[in-house]
Amino acid sequence: MDTTIQISNELLDRLKIMKMHSKESYESIIWDLIEDRLAFSVSTNKNIEQSEREIREGKTISLETLKKKIGG
């Protein structure tokens, strides 16, 4: 089932700029944006998990400790 959504003229202008070719649909652009965001979210979550693991394992130092080491 298809549906219609309302968007502002500003968003429409931005979507037009994002078209790779004149026949590309707005739906295709929106799907690409969603996929990019999901991929970023997966990558970000992995980085957060890795950082938390490094903190637990004592592989990191505080900003204050770093400042002292470099004389800042």
Image (cartoon, rainbow, N blue to C red):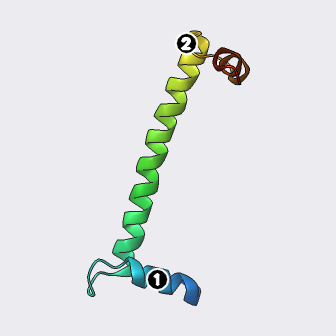
Residue shown at the point (55%, 12%) measured from the top left:
59
Identity of the residue furthest to the front in this view = 71
Residue under numbered circle 2: 59
User: Under tag 1, what secondary structure?
Assistant: loop
What residue is disc 1 on? 3
Give the image location of residue 2, x and y in percent.
Answer: 41, 81
Q: Which of marks 2 and 1 is nearer the N terminus?
A: 1
- Which quadrant holds the N terminus? bottom left
In the foreground, 68 or 50: 68
Q: Residue at x 44, y 51 (%)?
A: 38
Residue 57 is situated, as x and y percent measured from the top left of the image, at 56, 9
48 relative to 70 in the view: left or right: left
Does the image show residue 31?
Answer: yes
Between residue 14 and residue 38, name the one nearer to us. Answer: 14
Which kind of residue does numbered mark 2 sit on? Lys
Q: Which residue lies furthest to the bottom in this view?
A: 9
Residues marked 2 and 1 touching at CB (< 8 Å):
no
Q: Let me know if residue 6 appears in the view.
A: no
For the point 69% across and 20% down, the residue is: 71
Please rate how many residues cluster around mark 1, counting C-alpha atoms within 10 Å: few if below 14, some from 14 to 19, many from 20. Answer: few
Residue 52 is left or right of residue 63, and the answer is left
Q: What residue type is labelled 1?
A: Thr
* Secondary structure category for the residue under label 2: loop
Q: Is residue 26 left or right of residue 24?
A: right
